[in-house]
Amino acid sequence: MHKLRSSSVATLANVFTRLSSRSKSTGERPSAPLGSRILNNHDDIFKHNIWDHIQWTEEDKENARRKAEENSSIQIPLREQGKFDTEARQYWDKFYEMHQNKFFKDRKWLFLEFPELLPSGRTKTTSRFVGDQQAAQLTGSNTDAETGHQQHNNPTHHHRNTDTCNHQESCRGAALEKDEAAIQTTTFPGQHASFRILEVGCGVGNSVFPILNTIKDMDAFVYCCDFSPCAIQLVKDHPDYDESVCHAFVHDICEELASFPFPPQSLDVILAVFVFSSIHPDRLQGIVNRLSRHLKPGGIFLFRDYGRHDFSQLRFKKGRCLSENFYTRGDGTCVYFFTKEEVHDLFSSAGLEEVQNLEDKRLQVNRGKKVSMLRVYMQSKYRKLYPPS
């Protein structure tokens, strides 16, 4: 049995303290679902770059609908569309060859919105998160000590009978012990870690390295894959890349028969941030089905991507639309814009249980040019159920 190292609780405390103090000192969004910076006075609009929880007017909704209808009125002919799917790897490889690791910023917000990325005191032989009560005190959040999830994020949370809970916990612990025993008979990178994360579509590591720098000394391991060989090489060349805690590999999640370097039911977390939108929507259900098989019972799938009628969708010109709400950019890369209902159907059809499924509407401001943009993102969390006892 490989237990969490003794420094983990102190490390976890330092993480939350650092995140909290950073929010206070830099004016970044606080540790709350989708942020808490509310625009109450329109005269204050240019005081910050981002405003959270923006309420759209009926005029905003109609303008967005009209623009999307207009820019999708002329679609790329079907005979020309195939290359954007079959040559997607080449398009993204060229993108990373051109921009290297300078296009996207590191996602330092990850642990504010996805605290599930932290091991939180989890050990191999129990499904309880023994460090969650300390984490709740550090963040001041209303955290469920059993699941590690903030209760106000879970629309399906109910109080349950204590005897039933104890029985379920016993079954869960037994299931995890059985899974871990099976895993230990197979040799693979990260085999001995008690907490394993996979990021799909990792690009050049803008999520990977913030995660690695936060969870080191926590007996955790990170897998990251991308179908761009250039992107994966840039990850491996990064000074913070460490093969003892991370395994980067080239992998196309659209390939049905492509294998992963770890067995089924071995992952605690799967992270997909702005990756599914780049894939043809007809492929997504199969992708989520296959990925979900690698989650442990109780493991969680974390998702963030573009939402329907985001500013980036509305600014497309005519002739860039491939199909409804699916577009190609000038460099050949593609982007789809989701609704809450589509996201829910995608994950629930794979047998996962909704923990969170939110539409994140923000106002992004260019203070220099005095321009504002309505942004829409989807942020979701879906958990793999435990087998029936």
Image: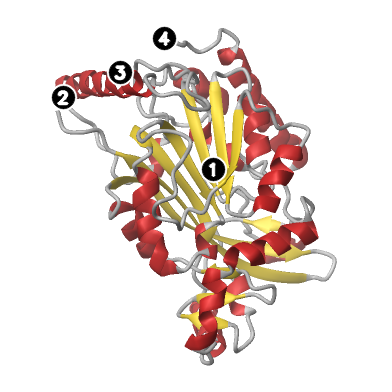
Secondary structure found at label 1: strand
Image quadrant in which the C terminus is located: top left
Q: What is the spatial separation of the Cα atoms under label 2 and label 1, in whole angstroms?
A: 34 Å
**Label 3: few (<14), some (14–19) or many (≥20) C-alpha neighbours in 10 Å:** some
Residues at badges 3 and 4 in contact (C-beta under 8 Å)? no
The residue shown at (50%, 75%) is: 326
Q: Where does the image place residue 151, in percent across and percent down from the top left?
A: 38, 36
The residue shown at (36%, 49%) is: 290
Q: Is residue 77 above or below residue 91?
A: below
- Front residue of 84 and 201: 84
Secondary structure found at label 4: loop
Mark 4 lies on residue: 1
Q: What is the spatial separation of the Cα atoms under label 1 and label 4, in whole angstroms?
A: 26 Å
Q: Do we see residue 112 in this rendering?
A: no
Q: Along the polypeptide, which appears first: circle 1 or circle 4?
A: 4
Residues at badges 2 and 1 in contact (C-beta under 8 Å)? no
Q: Where does the image place residue 342, in percent across and percent down from the top left?
A: 37, 64
- Front residue of 113 and 208: 208
Marking on residue 199:
1
Mark 3 lies on residue: 177
Q: Do we see residue 147 in this rendering?
A: yes
Horizontal arrangement in the rendering, residue 316 relative to residue 389 (left or right):
right
Q: Is residue 288 above or below residue 328?
A: above
Residues at badges 3 and 2 in contact (C-beta under 8 Å)? no
Marking on residue 164:
2
